Image: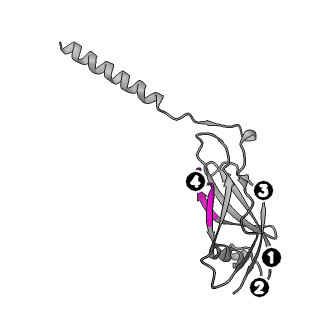
Amino acid sequence: MKLMKYFGLFVAAVVSLSACSSDLEHIEALPQDQAVAPMLHQLAESELTITADNKSSKFAVEWDAANFGEGIIFLTDIYLSYNDVEAALITGLDTKTTSYEINYSQIHTIVSKSVKDGGLGVEANTATDVKMRLGSKVGTTGPVLYSDYATIKVTYTE
């Protein structure tokens, strides 16, 4: 009787373990040359004038997510660049995020800061073409896959 009880527990444990293994998500990384970069959609706004009165205004950025393979988790960053200087505007967006509302104040901060302070050094009161792109990567050491650039004409006042 005691042997039958232990045998029953053993069978229950084996059945439980086999059921768990079938619930695991399939994860398979694509070879690096087959991974797909994020694709930035056309921007809803191509010209921004940032003033003290509208710094809380927002505009949406949308994209198709990168593809590193089934079940692979990655992060996406949004970058702005001007005169060959690039600065991260938004960092660490998760795998499922494919849109983001950016505050004008976030853009103002990056474009108005000097290059030595981590900004783009864009001159105030001047309409300037600033480029935006996305970069997605797995982990902290993996290669970054970049979208194509979109251009925004930015003017800000002090």
Q: Is residue 22 above or below residue 83?
A: above
> Tag 4: Cα neighbours inside 10 Å, few (<14), some, or many (≥20)?
some
Magenta residue check for 93: yes
Spatial separation of the CA atoms under disc 3 and disc 1: 19 Å
Spatial separation of the CA atoms under disc 4 and disc 3: 20 Å
Spatial separation of the CA atoms under disc 1 and disc 4: 30 Å
Q: Are marks 4 and 3 in contact (CB under 8 Å)?
A: no
Which residue is located at x 69 percent, y 56 percent? 135
Whichever of callouts 1 and 4 sits on the residue coming sooner in the sequence is: 4
Q: Are marks 2 and 3 in contact (CB under 8 Å)?
A: no
Q: Which residue is mark 3?
A: 148
Which residue is located at x 32 percent, y 18 percent? 11
**Looking at the rendering, which quadrant does residue 36 occupy?**
top right
Q: Please, what is the three-letter code of the amino acid marked with disc 3? A: Asp
Spatial separation of the CA atoms under disc 2 and disc 3: 27 Å
Whichever of callouts 3 and 1 sits on the residue coming sooner in the sequence is: 1
> Tag 1: Cα neighbours inside 10 Å, few (<14), some, or many (≥20)?
some
The N terminus appears in which quarter of the rendering? Answer: top left
Spatial separation of the CA atoms under disc 2 and disc 4: 35 Å
Whichever of callouts 4 and 3 sits on the residue coming sooner in the sequence is: 4
What's the mark number on residue 94?
A: 4
> Tag 2: Cα neighbours inside 10 Å, few (<14), some, or many (≥20)?
some
What's the mark number on residue 125?
A: 2
Q: Are marks 1 and 4 in contact (CB under 8 Å)?
A: no
Q: Please, what is the three-letter code of the amino acid marked with disc 4? A: Asp
The spot of residue 32 in percent (x, y) is: 72, 41
Q: Please, what is the three-letter code of the amino acid marked with disc 2? A: Asn
Whichever of callouts 2 and 3 sits on the residue coming sooner in the sequence is: 2
Q: Which residue is mark 1?
A: 128
